[in-house]
Image (spheres, rainbow, N blue to C red):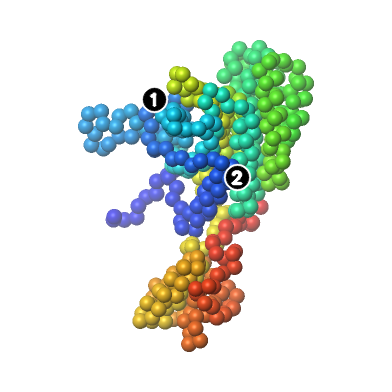
Amino acid sequence: MAGKPTPLSGFPELLPAQRFVESAVLDTLAEVFELHGFANVETRAVEPLDQLLRKGDTSKEVYVLRRLQEVGSGDAGLGLHFDLTVPFARYVLENAGKLEFPFRRYQIQKVWRGERPQDGRYREFTQADIDVVGAGELPVHHDVEVARVMLDALGRLTALIGLPGFRLQVNNRKLIQGFYTGLGVPDLDETMRLIDKLDKLPADAVRSQLVEAGLTGEQAQACLDLAGICTSDESFEAQVRALGVTDPLLDEGLAELAALMRGCAALVTDQVRIEADLKIARGLDYYTGTVFETRLDGHESLGSICSGGRYDALASDGKTTYPGVGISLGVSRLLVPLLNRGELVADRSVPSVVLVALADEESRPAADVLAGQLRGNGVPCEVAASPQKFGRQIRYAERRGIPYVLFSTDDGPQIKDIRSGDQVAADPASWSPPAADLKPRITLTQEKTQ
């Protein structure tokens, strides 16, 4: 390849130390999901276009799959998946006879979306999804379960990488739709779509758009009053009742949201909180009950980094309908901006804990034996690339973040902690570093986050 390549916007690539952070996050998520009994699946990268376009207004975002030298129909009608929910719905339908319901799955994969790249939004990115799907019916307690799993995962991420905290915002589409029905709103979907703009537009602008959509001034204000309710407990119910609107669907939505808040209360901490935020609606039209959005404290400009909800009819084979509830964490949306700004770092760029020093090329076989003994004891290590002066080999280890250097001496192997200068005799077959040094450490740079 001649010349320096030009980076592709929207397709993030990570340096080794950054990749370690991402890998540690993905490992933590998988561990938490499996602790809650979710099975891992992976679906193909492509789906039929007619399936991809069922999820709403996504036609401008789908990447079409086509061979450069295509003959005949070729791969026409296929596109790269832009999320993991639509492929999962297809997966359930194809494998329903082999699955036990309710089926609990987690999935961590790349997805592709043809939108304008910006901070936190990419054309290729990693998502981590969990879903519970039932056959015919799915009790609402699974909505609570999914929220609890994600709260657990977010809590462990704050401990792992020192993030400031998360705010899981929840609402219920039945509550919203029941309120609008009881209010006599002419177009429920359009009203919901406009209210969903409140994070981007001032209330007066949204009120004007509601009136243009056919609502009276009083109806528009009542919708804004509902959207303004936000509580960290079940007190939202009394505030909604005080607005004087009644409807059976509203009652059902209030009860489901209250049950979710009660079920998650024990997992709330200073770093991971849950709010009943009644302006949350989610823009996708297949949600039918609980909806989720999540903000990272101090980084609200990233938007929702974790979202999802209840869908009662996303998958159906004509005989059986498969309702589900799920939530998706945008791993790339969360991590890549922090990594690119240097706010989130690992203290070394390699997994090596020890550099085995090399006195001369003739001693390389002996150094390889020492390295093998370390690895046999579970200690990642590498042998020096060349027999430079020991001072240069130590500086080489420092640049890569390797904390220890092993020397061969007349008195036997010696381990040197190059941070403190301490050096002790050590048997490579049994020596282990302190647990904190065994893997690269992840830190959130304090001066960057204040």
The residue shown at (47%, 63%) is 350
Quarter of the picture holding the N terminus: bottom left
> What's the mark number on residue 87?
none
* Residue situated in front as seen by the camera: 324 or 376: 376
The residue shown at (53%, 36%) is 104
Query: Disc 2 on helix, strand or loop?
Result: helix
- Residue 174, percent from left and from top: 63, 21
Position above or below: 1 against 167: below
The residue shown at (68%, 15%) is 248
> What's the mark number on residue 153?
2
Few, some or many residues within 10 Å of mark 2 (<14, 14–19, 20+): many
How many tags in the picture? 2
Q: Determine the CA span between mark 1 and mark 2.
A: 34 Å
The residue shown at (34%, 55%) is 4
Position above or below: 75 against 119: above
Position above or below: 371 against 177: below
* Residue situated in front as seen by the camera: 405 or 349: 405
Q: In the rendered view, does 265 fall on the left or right side of 132?
A: right
Q: Which residue is denoted by mark 1 in the rendering?
A: 50
Query: Disc 1 on helix, strand or loop?
Result: helix
Few, some or many residues within 10 Å of mark 1 (<14, 14–19, 20+): few
- Residue 349, percent from left and from top: 49, 62
- Residue 24, percent from left and from top: 53, 53
Q: Earlier in the sequence, mark 1 or mark 2?
A: 1
What's the residue type where badge 1 is placed?
Asp
What's the residue type where badge 2 is placed?
Ala
| Residue 340 makes an appearance in the image | no
Q: In the rendered view, does 274 fall on the left or right side of 161?
A: right
Q: Nearer the viewer, mark 1 or mark 2?
A: 2
Residue projecting furthest to the left: 71
